[in-house]
Amino acid sequence: MSDPEAYSVEACLARIERWQPRINAFVSVGENPLNPAKGPLAGLPLAHKDMFYRAGQVSNCGSKIRKGWVAAETATVLERLDAAGALQLGTLSMAEFAYGPTGHNEHWGDCRNPWNPDYITGGSSSGSGAAVAAGLVVAALGSDTGGSVRIPAAACGVTGVKTTWGRVSRAGAMPLSHSLDTVGPLARSAEDCARILQVIAGFDPKDPISSREPVGSYAATKKSLDLKISVSTSWIERNADPEVAAAVLAAAKFFRAAEVEAPDFDTLSAHCVTVMGAEAAAQHARWMRERLDDYSSAVRVRLEAGYAVPAAAYLEVLRARGAWLESFCAGALAGADLYLLPAMTCRVPTREQTGPKGGAAMPGLLGEVTRLTRWVNYLGVPALVLPCGFDSRGLPIGLQLVARPFAESTLLAAGRAFQRATDWHQRAPADAPS
Amino acid sequence: MRPWSSEAVETVLAAQGIRLAPGRAAKLAAGLEAAIVADALRDALPFESDPSGYALAVERCKRK
């Protein structure tokens, strides 16, 4: 659990002032520091990706198009955090319209990794990962449509939850792809993620896909853990960077994971791209016709591709979604509660490798960054990313656990067990609280 | 199926009012080709299945 003294509002604001020039994690600071509500998160300093609306305040969504746009309503997740007594110290950097996996942003400046500013934070919840890693806040909300909570969590060495589709309300959050969009927390530990998720999870009549599935307790229990975990060792050895594979397979050993055949990540990932492309293109159609030049070239290119997805191909992929979910649960999860794999197959890349000057290798590298996250969004299942080591350059390595629908409590229990036995999550960049 | 061509991409986007930057169509066509993947599971779906079946699959897959 985070140390209340190290995370007083004053201490956080002082750290934000020191770190902001180095990492550009915040878009705005200090708009809602007071909250008289007494609740389970009373006085907890948070900040959120700049796409969760608050009535009367600006949500820029990482874009030029929405620069200075003032929201009329407050997002359900923010209302729930407010009622629980949490503080919002500001809004956080993000990829333009949450449509990019690296943390680059040509309108607002790149967000930079607190472990080494030459490296990416991951995206699209770039500021959320960076702010938590640098200890600027206890936790932050992010959104995850193809990996946007998990990639920054992995690259910045923090813990992040991609929730089951429909578990957390998206009302008042900027949409990207309605069949895939989810909201989830990033924090230093699974314990702190559980505290946030407990408050924001649950049915919301304002979100049409919100689930009525009861929310259990995400708190730690004294019951003994008897988790069964599966892994595909040979796939990881064949496809992941050797340093990533070694760290992730050491974690698999801790969990005594059983061997299973790997899901068809690449087919599922391609399906995710089809759905995301078509839905994002539809969401942005008016601006793509009227304000094309106000998009960065990277986001414009991603959106353009969606207009060429045939309607029948999009629907065919959605038609197969249920069958693929059942195949995953009857295959990799047949005898297990959780499936274990890396968050990314590659080590954290540099900003230059993955930016406009990345050259011919750049698209392939971006493919490795997202190769193991998008398939989870297509299935709609929950996942947890947490640090499991550091590479030879001192950058974090992320472990990913994937569960059945609505099994967030199982994920968090496994995360707690791992973090009780290891200290990867307590390591912090110099000048950040551990 | 015939592969995507630059001309086809330009036509499809122009019909929707989306203006492409010069030279973009060829790259986009290549990207679209990469997104077309074989999927035996999809091809074996019963005729009656539709996207709403996903909600039933979620119910079946939850841990009881």
Image (tube, rainbow, N blue to C red):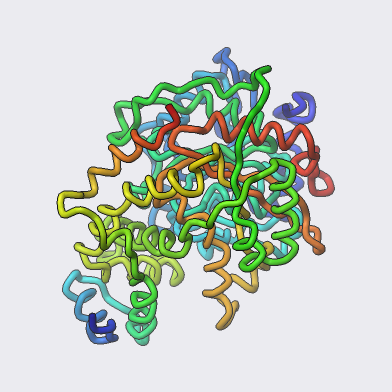
Front residue of A405 and A136: A405
Residue A89 visible in the picture? no
Q: Residue at x 61, y 45 (%)?
A: A385
Image quadrant of residue A65?
Answer: bottom left
Residue A393: % across, % down: 80, 63
Count the marks. 0
Front residue of A405 and A184: A405
Q: Quadrant of the C terminus of chain A?
A: top right
Residue A277: % across, % down: 34, 62
Q: Residue furthest top?
A: A38
* Image position of A102 with respect to A209: above or below: below
Q: Is residue B59 left or right of residue A126?
A: left
Residue B35 visible in the picture? yes
Image quadrant of residue A283?
Answer: bottom left
Q: Residue at x 60, y 62 (%)?
A: A235
Q: Residue at x 61, y 21 (%)?
A: A219
* Image position of A277 with respect to A430: above or below: below
Residue A364: % across, % down: 54, 74
* Image position of A42 with respect to A273: above or below: above
Front residue of A387 and A359: A387
Q: Is residue A231 left or right of residue A404?
A: right
Residue A194: % across, % down: 59, 28
Q: Quadrant of the N terminus of chain A?
A: top right
* Image position of B44 with respect to A432: above or below: below
Q: Residue at x 39, y 62 (%)?
A: A273
Front residue of A199 and A245: A245
